Amino acid sequence: MERPSEGTCFESAGRWLLKEPHLKEARLAHGLVNGTGRASGQSFAHAWIEIGDVVIDTESGWIGRREEYYGLGEVREVRLYELDEMVKKVLKSRHWGPWEDEAGN
């Protein structure tokens, strides 16, 4: 998964998770999505929050069911991180993600 050249979704989703440590079911999600609107036809790395079957897209403000979100964005190659795992990845890599293509991460 390539690091995005613009946008703040990885940092905003990561910071959201840091601010809500009491939500034990919350997970940071990284995946590939297909764009809509002006970005239609483009595929890019993206980050959001999942709590059970609810998705919170911290970049767009979208909140809804995972099934709908995954369908709208044609979401694939999803990796979920618990809070402690995310913190370790941020500290080791010194960035908010994505981390999947980095050796040892």
Image: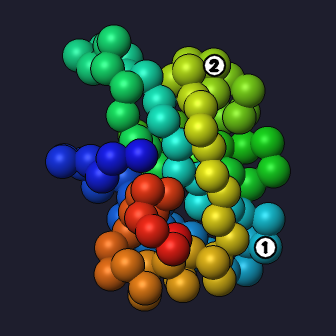
Residue 72 lies, with reference to residue 5, above or below; the image says above
Residue 6 pos. (x, y %): 19, 47
Residue 54 pos. (x, y %): 72, 43
Which one is closest to the eye, mark 2 or mark 1?
2
Residue shown at the point (78%, 73%) measured from the top left = 24
Residue 82 lies, with reference to residue 1, above or below; the image says below
Let me know if residue 63 appears in the view.
no
Let me know if residue 100 appears in the view.
yes
Is disc 1 placed on a helix, strand or loop?
Answer: loop
Q: Disc 2 marks which residue?
A: 71
How many dots with numbers? 2
Which of pointers 2 and 1 lies earlier in the amino acid sequence?
1
Residue 92 pos. (x, y %): 43, 85
Colour scheme: rainbow
The part of the image, by quadrant, that contains residue 83 is bottom right
Q: Nearer the viewer, residue 73 or 32?
A: 32
